[in-house]
């Protein structure tokens, strides 16, 4: 029997070769680190160095390989910033942004494992955006919320043109600003504590007026 010829297509080597929607999806995003890269890019366009800094543990070779694969799969694109910057950034395509509810579901399923932070755990503030966004969206509120943790800031937008989140300060004036610690943010995300309860217990500082602020305080 002649030896089998090796496949040269990287995508084919990783394919499950199953006519199944779940298998096809995993062909595209099932590799280690891919969905975490999506998590980072859901927060907005990122430079390679920023991605590497916020993905502790990934090697430069693996990160470069995953980004290339994501471009080939139509999940992300790479573009050069206009002058005077000479940097390139990676950003999600519409197809890539459709993975937001997938990551929210995974985050919700994994939330019970956040009972205790291990000494070896890295943490970034915007990593809490995914579960918090899901929690706020489920509460039926709508608007832009700025969130400040000791580890940093992020913002979430619920309702309107669709749910989204970003790292750092909000691009527009937020309707509500929340200040809380990571433990409280996890409790709100898991449905163990509402924003209103957190405010009344002194665990959350809320500033803002209007419909969104009143809705959160009433919770």
Image: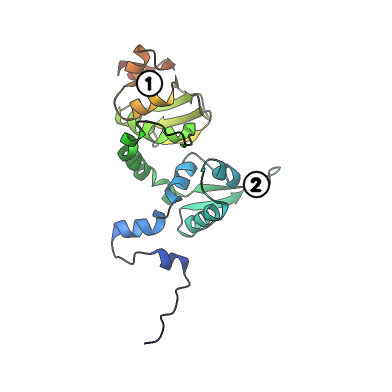
Q: Which residue is mark 2?
A: 87
Residue 66 pos. (x, y %): 49, 55
Write the residue at 42% across / 31% down: 157
Looking at this view, name the residue that lies furthest to the bottom.
1
Give the CA separation, mark 2 to mark 1. Answer: 38 Å
Q: Residues within 10 Å of mark 1 (few under 14, many from 20)?
A: some
Closest to the camera, between mark 2 and mark 1, is 2
On the question of residue 164 being in view, the answer is: yes
Quarter that holds the C terminus: top left
Write the residue at 45% across / 50% down: 33
Q: Residues within 10 Å of mark 2 (few under 14, many from 20)?
A: few
Write the residue at 37% across / 31% down: 116
Judged left or right of residue 197, residue 94 is right
On the question of residue 159 being in view, the answer is: no
Judged left or right of residue 53, residue 125 is left
Instruction: Please determine whether, in this image, residue 214 is positioned above or below residue 47.
Output: above
Judged left or right of residue 88, residue 97 is left
Count of numbered badges drawn on the protein? 2
Residue 207 pos. (x, y %): 45, 15
Quarter that holds the N terminus: bottom left
Badge number at residue 103:
none
Write the residue at 33% across / 36% down: 113
Task: Name the quadrant containing residue 162.
Answer: top left
Badge number at residue 212:
1
Q: SS of the residue at dot 2?
A: loop
Task: Name the quadrant containing residue 128.
Answer: top left
**Disc 2 to disc 1: CB gap under 8 Å:** no
């Amino acid at each position: 029997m002649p030896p089998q010829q090796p496949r040269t297509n990287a995508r084919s080597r990783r394919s499950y070769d199953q006519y199944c929607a779940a298998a096809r999806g995993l062909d595209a995003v099932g590799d280690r680190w891919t969905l975490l890269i999506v998590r980072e890019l859901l927060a907005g366009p990122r430079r390679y160095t920023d991605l590497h800094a916020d993905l502790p543990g990934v090697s430069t070779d693996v990160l470069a390989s995953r980004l290339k694969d994501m471009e080939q799969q139509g999940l992300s694109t790479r573009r050069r910033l206009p002058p005077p910057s000479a940097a390139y950034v990676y950003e999600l395509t519409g197809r890539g942004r459709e993975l937001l509810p997938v990551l929210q579901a995974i985050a919700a399923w994994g939330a019970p494992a956040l009972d205790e932070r291990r000494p070896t755990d890295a943490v970034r503030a915007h990593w809490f955006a995914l579960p918090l966004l899901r929690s706020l969206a489920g509460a039926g509120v709508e608007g832009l919320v700025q969130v400040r943790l000791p580890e940093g800031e992020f913002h979430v937008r619920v309702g309107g043109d669709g749910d989204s989140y970003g790292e750092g300060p909000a691009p527009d004036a937020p309707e509500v600003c929340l200040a809380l610690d990571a433990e409280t943010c996890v409790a709100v995300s898991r449905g163990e504590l509402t924003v209103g309860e957190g405010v009344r217990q002194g665990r959350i500082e809320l500033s803002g007026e209007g419909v969104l602020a009143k809705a959160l305080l009433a919770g």
